[in-house]
Image (cartoon, rainbow, N blue to C red):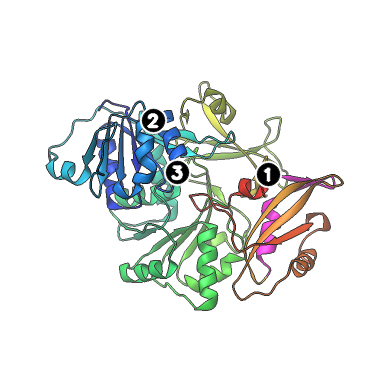
Amino acid sequence: MRCGDRVAIFLDNTWQCAVALYGTLLADAAFVIINPQTKYDKLRYILNDSGATAMVTDAHLQGAFASAVGSASSLLSVLVTGGVPAGASPVPMLDFDAALSSASAEAVGQNNISIDLSSLIYTSGSTGEPKGVMHSHQSMLFALQSLVEYLRLQEDDRLLCVLPLAFDYGLYQLLMAVHLGATLVLERSFTYPAQVFKVMNDEGVTIFPGVPTVFAMLLATHERQALSFPLVRRVTNTAAALPPSFNLRLREVFPNADIFRMYGLTECKRVSYLPPEEIDKKPDSVGIPIPGTEAMVLNDSGVRVKPGETGKLYVRGAHVMLGYWNLPEQTAHMLKAGKFPGERVLCTHDLFTVDEDGYLYFVGRSDDIIKTRGEKVSPVEVENAMFAIPGIREVAVVGIPDEVLGQAIRAYVVLQPDSDLSEKHIRAMCLTRMENFMVPKEVVLTPELPKTTTGKISKKTLGER
């Protein structure tokens, strides 16, 4: 294997996945972690787009990888855990356990330097094809050191990870644990909450990272049967805004924990965090820039906005991506010239405001803003107001074409199991909580919301309904 080669890691959240990741780095290669729920077509695309020369996978994922490997022209070998599948393969397949047991314990000489490629993390693309976000060793190390600092993590912490390691939020739980010498409690998913809760108690978990859908499931369970995890010291959220109405209820479940609201994106890992001491004063804010970075909200003229004005968020720091793999135009769309010659700054294209103290507030994606009745409406603002209605478990707000309004607001709502709310009742409650033009024209009750493989609500799928 040559310096800079890519290794695809197509595994569940297992110890083998962690070993494959660090083994790739020790071999001077770059890892490409792929969600195990990925289907054949997307897997084939990522293998070909990344030019992966090797892949590590599991026998039980054969249904997805068996055909894909034959279509990957760059692939030279496949390591398989759980036994090599029977039958002929166009690419040599090796037994992972056998390779591990026969490997030399001698240190491997490394040629990589800090600015070399360490990973390709594929994220959803606006064109429908995933984009490979390029990070260097330097950018990832800077990000995890900054995370450890502001989250106040310690060597004796025990970090739970129920999020896919292919999702950078899950991946960094592993990286932070190894960096600190702390303990990672790795679960395959949050599909069976009761099992996860038992593991949390048995293993003495102290750090609970989640996304809003995980917290919605947790709080729904708490409504039926009171939960309490007094050993947890930190609760962290990212991927989507945590509804402010969750704050008080999460304190019931985690009575001794600091709650961190955060904002980030794969292109720079993390941008901001709200110090837990400020959560009651600024419950809607995603906080201040993480240590060692600068975040600026600029108007269309490139001037910093005044408090309360809306602009696009720009990010400076060592954690900014190198670019998108083989996508120069999309890279140029995101990386802009900085204030120093040769510097590149990340333009998130997300809309933000700041307050008088410099705290950041997420308004929405620039392409998510709903224009209705001549007004601009943030779906996040409507969702937060609706989350405060008792009986609502999850909500997603989208804009739909309307001949009169331009766009009408539609809210998809998942109710708590014991709720008897109706669409009419929900709209009436909305009228008491927000301006008339922000009230959804349509409320659609649904048993569940479509999710991406990383647990985010897929508004693109909702928009196609």
Q: CA distance from mark 3 to mark 1?
A: 27 Å
Looking at the rendered structure, the secondary structure element under dot 1 is loop
Looking at the rendered structure, the secondary structure element under dot 2 is loop
Q: Residues within 10 Å of mark 3 (few under 14, many from 20)?
A: some
> Which label belongs to residue 368?
1
Please state which amino acid type lies under the numbered disc 1. Asp
Point out residue 160 in the picture as x, y percentages from the top left corner.
38, 60
Q: Is 378 a magenta residue? A: yes
Instruction: Report which residue position mark 3 lands on.
Output: 39
Image height of 252 relative to 29, above or below: below
Disc nearer the start of the sequence (3/1): 3
> Which label belongs to residue 460?
none
Q: In the displayed structure, does residue 405 sit left or right of residue 178?
A: right
Q: Which of label 1 and label 2 is nearer to you? A: 2
Highlighted range, magenta? 368-389
> Which label belongs to residue 71?
2
At 33% from the left edge and 52% from the top edge, which residue is drawn? 177
Looking at the rendered structure, the secondary structure element under dot 3 is loop
